Image (tube, grey):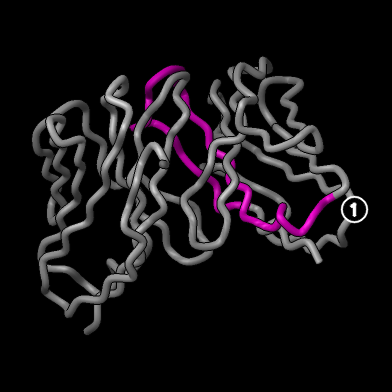
Amino acid sequence: QKEVEQDPGPLSVPEGAIVSLNCTYSNSAFQYFMWYRQYSRKGPELLMYTYSSGNKEDGRFTAQVDKSSKYISLFIRDSQPSDSATYLCAQGAQGGKLIFGQGTELSVKP
Amino acid sequence: GAGVSQSPRYKVAKRGQDVALRCDPISGHVSLFWYQQALGQGPEFLTYFQNEAQLDKSGLPSDRFFAERPEGSVSTLKIQRTQQEDSAVYLCASSSRTGNSGNTIYFGEGSWLTVV
């Protein structure tokens, strides 16, 4: 079992839809979680960063951490074609390294 | 430049050939990471430098993989006697901080290695 599990999709939604992306983690020792967006043939870019439980909102994006179920989520409201990318969840681990999920490929159709 | 720069962007190597991948981190960043990303997968940690010290090399898949950062800035990832399973994107990332600092880690665009 991987330390961070993510449904690889692909996920296809119409423009304007609410998108829900999810990951589970197994190691509760580290409580830093990140969501990265990766466009084709580009490096990952940080979207959201959260520590411990609760919600964090930034524009159309909301990151949520549920420690009790070891579940992390990213919600995208009013999705746009420009949101089409691969979304990677990550857990911060010892020494600053990141443990990534497999990535979910999202396509937003106009 | 302002970001993490990697070269070459694309490399095709014949099986058995040695390759060297270069990373120029953001100026002044003390932490430098290498990750390997296979097609359709998330990045996997390879190794971590704090300045010139290689503090964690637990992710290097075999002794054919070697990384260095001799002056605490530019880093090189070397793969000896490349195999087909080494085909992947090699991502470099840097941070101005050490420890748990996920919100300050910046990635380069990667070096795409194809072994034929």
* Residue positioned 83% across, 48% down in the render: B19
Count of marks placed on residues = 1
| Quadrant hosting residue B23 | top right
Residue B29 percent coordinates (x, y): 53, 25
User: With respect to residue A37, does B104 lie above or below?
Assistant: above
Drawn side of residue B12 relative to residue B104, left or right: right
* Residue positioned 43% across, 36% down in the render: A99
Drawn side of residue B79 relative to residue A89, left or right: right
* Residue positioned 13% across, 36% down in the render: A66
Q: Which residue lies furthest to the front in this view?
A: A1
Q: Give the range drawn in magenta.
A: B82-110
Badge 1: how crowded within 10 Å, few (<14), some, or many (20+)?
Answer: some
Residue A65 percent coordinates (x, y): 16, 37
**Which residue is identified by label 1?**
B17
User: With respect to residue A7, does A29 lie above or below?
Assistant: above
The amino acid at mark 1 is Gln
| Quadrant hosting residue B10 | bottom right
Label 1: state its secondary structure. Answer: loop
Picture quarter with the N terminus of chain A: top left
User: With respect to residue A23, does B50 lie above or below?
Assistant: above
Q: Does the magenta stretch include residue B60?
A: no
Drawn side of residue B83 relative to residue A23, left or right: right
User: With respect to residue A7, does A97 lie above or below?
Assistant: above
| Quadrant hosting residue A103 | bottom left
Q: Nearer the viewer, residue B100 or B26?
A: B100
Q: Chain letter of disc 1?
A: B
Residue A92 percent coordinates (x, y): 37, 29
Picture quarter with the C terminus of chain A: bottom left
Q: Does the magenta stretch include residue B98?
A: yes
